[in-house]
Image (spheres, rainbow, N blue to C red):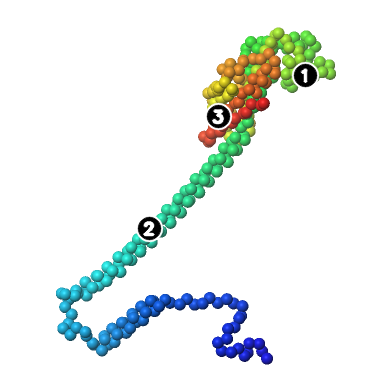
Amino acid sequence: MVDGAGDAPGAVVDDGVTRRPSPRWPLSAICAVLISSILVAVLLLMNLLGVQLNEGGYDADVGGSMAEWFEAFATLLGVPAAVVFGVRQLQSTGAVLELERRQLVGEEQERTERRRAEQAILQRSVSLRVQVDNVLDAPDLARDDERRAVERLADEYLQRGWVRDQAAGTWRQGAAVRTNAEQLATEPTPLAPAPWFVTVDCHNSGTVAVVLESWTLVDDTGSTTIDAPVELPPGRHHHQRLGVSEGLLDAYRHPDEADAAARARAVVLEGFDAGGRTFRIVHQPRR
């Protein structure tokens, strides 16, 4: 015997599919439709049979003409339609304005993120160092009297048996080899009593030129700003000596004194690139 062949009428068959009950009309809606249908049927029947409720005829002056009835009917339909249309139009306009606002916000966020990325790249491409230099390693930053002293100093070292390799920045005597800094620290001379000074070195490793607009030195007593714009092409260094104008000494007798002065100050460099993007680099002092 085949399963399901003997299902009784009205039996509930469970086929694994959940069926939603069909929605039922409320009683008021059923009554309204029934009354409207009866009225339509009665009016249609009266029209077919020629039955008139008012035997005296219709007076247009009292009840209004067909055009007036049509105008009133059109007004009754037009006012709600206009209200609905206006509401829909306002909603549509509001949706368009909201979409445009979101697009503007998204574009502004995109521009802000792009500017931040470009500024981050610019920040990384410009490096700043505060270091201690001397009259032998940085003759271009030495004063005129210091350059003359260097010439006499070199003659004195030669008399002591030292041979100078100016390109390598070293001194050789037999097997001993010293850098310029080691030579000045190991064999001081009255010809250059204060050969050390503090410098800032800025390197542009990017692909566009930058302008170093100002330097600000900050210490425990205050800050000093130097407005000295310098254009720095790609791949170039800028070396600047710091002195009395920046709250330091022009020269130091010992490298440790110059290093202590460099470590006691923070340097803030501000500038911009060829595209007008600004940057700010802060060199914190070493403790």
Residue 56 x %, y %: 16, 83
Tell me if mark 1 has few (under 14), some (14-19) or many (20+) residues whose alpha carbon lies within 10 angstroms of its own: some
Please give the name of the residue rendered at 55% of the width and 43% of the height, measured from the top-left corner. 113
Residue 286 seen: yes
In this picture, is 207 found above or below 165? below
Name the residue carrying label 1.
178
Quarter of the rendering containing residue 13: bottom right
Mark 2 or 3: the one toward you: 2
- The dot on residue 117 is none
Q: Secondary structure beneath disc 2?
A: helix
Q: Nearer the viewer, residue 58 or 214?
A: 58
Report, in whole angstroms, how far the alpha carbon at label 1 lies from the one at label 3. 37 Å
Residue 115 x %, y %: 54, 40
Report, in whole angstroms, how far the alpha carbon at label 2 lies from the one at label 1. 84 Å
Q: Nearer the viewer, residue 247 or 19?
A: 19
Amino acid under label 2?
Answer: Leu
Mark 1 or 3: the one toward you: 3
- The dot on residue 90 is 2
Amino acid under label 3?
Answer: Glu
Tell me if mark 3 has few (under 14), some (14-19) or many (20+) residues whose alpha carbon lies within 10 angstroms of its own: some
Give the mark nearest the N terminus, 2 or 3.
Answer: 2
Residue 164 seen: no
Mark 2 or 1: the one toward you: 2
Which corner quadrant holds the C terminus? top right
Name the residue carrying label 3.
270
Q: Nearer the viewer, residue 56 or 196?
A: 56
In this picture, is 155 found above or below 32? above
Please give the name of the residue rendered at 63% of the width and 18% of the height, measured from the top-left corner. 141
Q: Secondary structure beneath disc 1?
A: strand
Please give the name of the residue rendered at 78% of the width and 13% of the height, measured from the top-left corner. 162
